[in-house]
Image: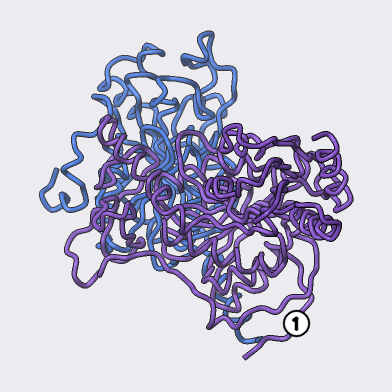
Amino acid sequence: MRKSLEKYYRTERLPHIWCPGCGHGIVTGAVIRAIDNLNIDQNKICIVSGIGCSSRAPGYLNFNTLHTTHGRALAFATGIKLANPELKVIVLTGDGDCTAIGGNHFIHSARRNIDITTIIFNNNIYGMTSGQYSPMTPKGAFATTAPYGNIDRNFDLCKLAQAAGATYVARGTVYHVPQLIKMIEKAITHKGFSVVEAATICPTYFGRKNKVGSPVKMMEILRDNTITIKAAEKMSKEELEGKIVMGEFYEETAPEYTEEYMKIIKNAQGVE
Amino acid sequence: MTNKPVLMQGNEACVEGAIVAGMRFYAGYPITPSTEIAEIAAERLPKVGGKFIQMEDEIASMGAVIGASLAGLKSMTATSGPGFSLKQENIGYACLTEVPCVIVDVQRGGPSTGLPTLPAQGDVMQARWGTHGDHPIIVLSPSYVREVFDMTVRAFNLSEKYRTPVILLMDEVIGHMREKVILPDPSTVEVINRKKPDLSKITKYNPYEDVDGDGIPPMVNFGEGFPYHVTGLIHDVYGAPSTNPEVTFKLISRLMKKIENNIDDIIDYEKLYTEDAETVVISFGSTARSVTRAVKILRNDNVKIGALRLKTIWPFPKTAINELPDSVKNIIVAEMNYGQLIETIEATSKGKFNIFGLNKFNGELISPDEVIDKVREVLNNA
């Protein structure tokens, strides 16, 4: 780690709990680098998470950090942001935490366009509980609870976010770190509900169960399977099967929730 | 300055009390018979610079309330049985992370969707043990509209003082009934705020360190310059997750003891004619209104009867039972449920009294006549 980044970590809490080869440290590092590039006061940043491997990240980070209940990070984050809009609120969550148990809070936070940045560590599996399928597990993949192959259809999280009303939506991967950092920077700077899906790897549970190979092999697959939005536009549905489309999908300027609420306060106080 | 008398609903008095107590954040989800609390909060809060949000569900409301409290605003939510069940996991989170907040449960008939528009007192045990694991909880139960105001203030005060969720256990009768009330001048109402360290003097902050030895760590709000970690995992004084048996033992013990050691400050009850009573009727919430009426009628008939009204239900006010005079032989526990608090009263009494339940769970309140009939039945069979 670069010496100048150490202030963002609670170094006394390291080493972290993640398995060797896990991609979560890369996403966490990208979040830290984005914050460093933006030079935001650490005291004014609040990082909120739910439950799962990715949700353990805030515990290692030196900000106002809140490790909440499973799926509910965005609900807690909404309370924090509305109570004190001066705080930059960032939610770190996993694919299970965000799209299964937390799916309702995700779509409604997007609908409100509340100024919260959500980074989804998508490793396509429940890692903390040792390898059950999530709503982001590809159809046909194996999991401890899908021993005969997964028949569930998986979400396209970026499409879901955009349809629900998020005003900045992007997808990066832990192989393409400089791009991922830029996306997170943009998401944090964006006023409104911003979503960055970070495709990451779980060699221990997803990798072993699906006989993908070593962490290095999984990173290579991530590299080879990732294509840009531009390239994807020219491909057929069949050709897109199993590909990760990377890039910025959507950006829009729209009224932000806490600013709209401040208008209500002004209005209510003027009338009285 | 004396305020004018007004006709006010219990749910309305709850919001008025909350605002006087300093509530500046409300998150909720519509549910009968508590919805007026949300509606009035939506209208009143922005006028005092506070925030209201209707969340996507009951669970989210509880989460938002905890988040807002951590960010420094006194926060409340209101619900009824089904919603109360949904909130339980996050209520436990607030217990363990010691985040002050107030949860109002305007009880209706249950279980399940039950009787949405009719009263019950079936959430007594859910209020105590609804969330999992060992945890302290404070539960208050008002019987009058004016008392709803006072008790909501008290709920916020206790919550801030002891850094713990406080449940205001109302019922449909108290929530919807309108009574003439005279509200106090807000300047005369005692308001307690959370204990904070002197931010200008401290250089570091350990969020769960019991620096004052009273079991209640001072609380810094998020954004005040001392970033710290909050987790629903068992944690040490620095807020770091731990599975260490000693850390676990110390944390749970401190959480329980910060309430146990202050029980005299927390419990509250009211006695009526108990000094020479041979029979005492114990009740709480709206049932206590019928009991009071019945006991007064019976006293006029020279029946040696008294009433004990529990204003704090949890922690259970054992003193109220233990200090009953030796003249007391019979206890009748009147509650709008199949019999919940009676078990705690039996356990506390240790066989000292003959204990009878007056229970109603059909969506109707217990009338004074029914109390009188029950007392006569008990005395006739004695």
Q: Nearer the viewer, residue A160 or B271?
A: B271
Q: Residue at x 43, y 41 (%)?
A: A50
Q: Is residue B333 above or below residue B192?
A: above
Residue A79 % position (x, y): 50, 58
Residue B293: image x %, image y %?
81, 59
Tell me what hue chain A is rendered in.
Answer: blue
Residue found 35% across the figure and 48% down from its top: B230
Q: Position of residue A85 (x, y in %)?
A: 44, 67
Residue A183 visible in the displayed image = no
**Who's purple, chain-wise?**
B
Residue A132: percent from the left, percent from the top?
47, 20
Label 1 resides on the chain identified as: B
> What residue is drawn where x is 73% and y is 42%?
B332
Residue found at the very far left of the displayed protein: A3
Q: Quadrant of the C terminus of chain A?
A: bottom right
Number of marks in picture:
1
For the point 63% across and 59% down, which residue is it?
B270
Other residues around mark 1 within 10 Å, as few (<14) / some (14–19) / many (≥20): few
The image quadrant of residue B252 is top left
Is residue B1 placed above or below B107 in the rendered structure? below
Q: Amino acid at mark 1?
A: Pro
B275 shown above or below A99: below
Q: Is residue B203 left or right of residue B99?
A: left
Q: Is residue A259 above or below residue B123?
A: below
Farthest top residue in view? A148
Instruction: Provide the residue designation for mark 1.
Output: B5
